[in-house]
Image (tube, helix red, strand yellow):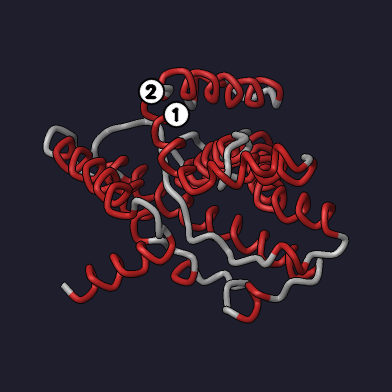
Amino acid sequence: MKIVKNYYDRFKVLNPRYSEVKLGIIAAIIIYFIARIFFTTKISRDMIISFAVFVISMTLHEVAHGYVAYKFGDDTAKRKGRITLNPLKHIDLTGIILPILILLSGFKFLVGWAKPVPVNFYNLRPHRLGLFCVAIAGIVVNFTLALISLVLLKFLGKHLDIENIFMTILLYIYLINLLLGLFNLIPITPLDGGRIVYSFSGEKVREFYNKIERYGILIIFVIVYFGSSFLTHGFLEIVEFFLRLAGINISLFL
């Protein structure tokens, strides 16, 4: 119970307005996914691999934000020990439980998050360029990992069987990092896409983003829930496009 209370107190600090409502919505979503688990199959090798890749990819994403912020003059993340490859430093309890439940409940669209790396944006110099580079850093890392894995799939596919575990890992690195990068481009704060727009915007747009950021997670949940079919279809089209572009036989994977 002490762990639950500590988590609740921390959640209230991070979400001072309507914290009970937000926590209630998150709890309802978690209960929903737990209920679905009873109708799904057992845990598979692919589930374990995809979850491990997801955690590592999110860790690298957050480290990139903190490192770039440090290079632009803000040492907040460094002082708090967040420029580290240790996943435990970046794991958010809700953000890590949710993707586990999604995987176990049979959903194909994975949603989760790490603890945002603390950045004091006022310390960034030059300010606008710093904002943009910090915002895009995680996305660049994800797209770079996706590109590297795609190239390796292309060349190693000639020598390794498609069922080889290394090929499976590479496929999930490609899929998860491409999807993480694309998802974070959605222009809603606290997603990186919203930060990117914010970095280029004038006062009125910034004021709008400042107002909606406190409801950002709820807005994202609504978008994912009601637009899951559209998002899944759109993202899979992009996934298949790059596989075809690399000359990789899509039927072997999808």
Residue, disc 1: 223
Q: Please report contact status of discs 1 and 2: CB closer than 8 Å, yes or no.
A: yes
**Figure label count:** 2
Secondary structure category for the residue under label 1:
helix
Horizontal and vertical percent for residue 209? Answer: 62, 42
How much space separates mark 1 and mark 2, taking CA atoms? Answer: 6 Å
- Between residue 26 and residue 12, name the one nearer to us: 12
Q: Is 74 left, or right, of 126 in this rendering?
A: left
Residue type beneath disc 1: Ile
Left or right: where 54 falls relative to 160: left
Res 117 label:
none
Within 10 Å of disc 1 (Cα), the crowding (few <14, some 14-19, many 20+) is few
Question: Among all residues in the image, which is located at the extreme right?
Answer: 126
Label 2 Cα crowd, 10 Å radius (few <14 / some 14-19 / many 20+):
few
Q: Is residue 172 visible?
A: yes
Front residue of 91 and 164? 91
Residue 239: image location, x then y, percent: 58, 26
Residue at x-position 81% and y-position 66%: 72
Q: Nearer the viewer, residue 246 or 36?
A: 36
- Picture quadrant of residue 191: top right
Q: Position of residue 184 (x, y in %)?
A: 59, 41
- In the rendered image, the quadrant that contains the N terminus is bottom left
User: Percent x, y for residue 31?
Assistant: 18, 44
Q: Residue at x 54, y 53 (%)?
A: 57
Which element carries disc 2, helix, strand or loop?
helix
User: Image height check: is 61 above or below 4?
Assistant: above
Kind of residue indicated by mark 2? Phe
* Farthest residue, direction bottom: 79
Task: Give the label on residue 226, or none.
Answer: 2
